[in-house]
Amino acid sequence: MAVRAVEVPVVGERNAVVSVAVHAGDPVSGEGAVACLRSIQGITLLPPDRRPEADVLLVTVHQTTEDMVRWMERAATESTNPDMRIVLVAETISEHHLMRAVTSGMVAFLPREEADRDRVVKTIRDSKRDRALVPEQMVGWLLEQVRTIQRTVLVPNGLTVGGLQEREVEVLRLLADGLDTVEIAQQLNYSERTIKNIVSGMLTRLNLRNRSHAVAYAMRCGAL
């Protein structure tokens, strides 16, 4: 029986060339994946030594083991492409490993039995456009894990899902409304120095470039 999946569309580039690096659990699977993708228009295959540059990392394995999840985490850390996405082809993935894989950049999971060439190519292209493909059961797992994290970690520490503190969200909301530091300080009954410290600490902790980037981040993660 085919696994039903939920596709989540997000506006993105339609005709861009996608650079792909392949990582396989065995040589036969790797050679097969490379052979399937080599002649596809719009896809550029990268050799292993250029894997950190890839737009999409195609990982094809039989079982999603602890070692493989750790490998994906390392690949995410080593990537020089901030928009790198992972497409995982495997027989299954456990609930325990799913959140870690998603955190590492996995946006699509394909069961091996459904991973023919056309489906793999479409999934790679969709992942570059930020279209997620995850079986319904796994969506349920992810939602439950997010709820657990929010209930046991975020709320007790006054944090949002995006890792923002409540007063940081207050400041960002006013920044988004066009207020400057003086006006925000007056609105929240803080000193100007306190507002500057809040913004500076937030930018440093979340590796954000400036106030505009912080507002955009808060909007993307649903804090605003």
Image: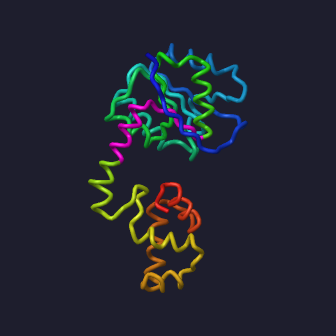
Kindly identify the residue that appears in the image at 60 percent across and 39 percent down. 53
Where residue 38 appears, as percent x and y from the top left, is 66, 20
Q: Quadrant of residue 97?
A: top left
- Residue 82 vs 25, above or below: the answer is below
| Residue at x 64% of width, y 45% of height | 11
**How is this picture coloured?**
rainbow
Residue 207 x, y percent position in the rendering: 49, 60
The residue range painted magenta reads 130-146
Tell me the residue at 38%/35% (across/down). Answer: 98
Q: Is residue 184 left or right of residue 138?
A: right
Left or right, residue 71 beside residue 56: left
Find residue 35 and report its image quarter: top right
- Residue placed furthest toward the top: 28
Looking at the image, which residue is at 60% across and 20% down? 34
Q: Is residue 86 above or below residue 33?
A: below
- In x, y percent, where is residue 198? 44, 74
The quarter of the picture where the N terminus appears is top left
Q: In x, y percent, where is residue 50?
A: 60, 34
Of helix, strand and loop, which mostly describes the magenta segment? Answer: helix
Q: Nearer the viewer, residue 211 or 80?
A: 211
Magenta residue check for 145: yes
Tell me: residue 136, above or below residue 84.
above
> Magenta stretch: residue 165 in it?
no
Please tell me how many numbered marks the rendered image carries: 0
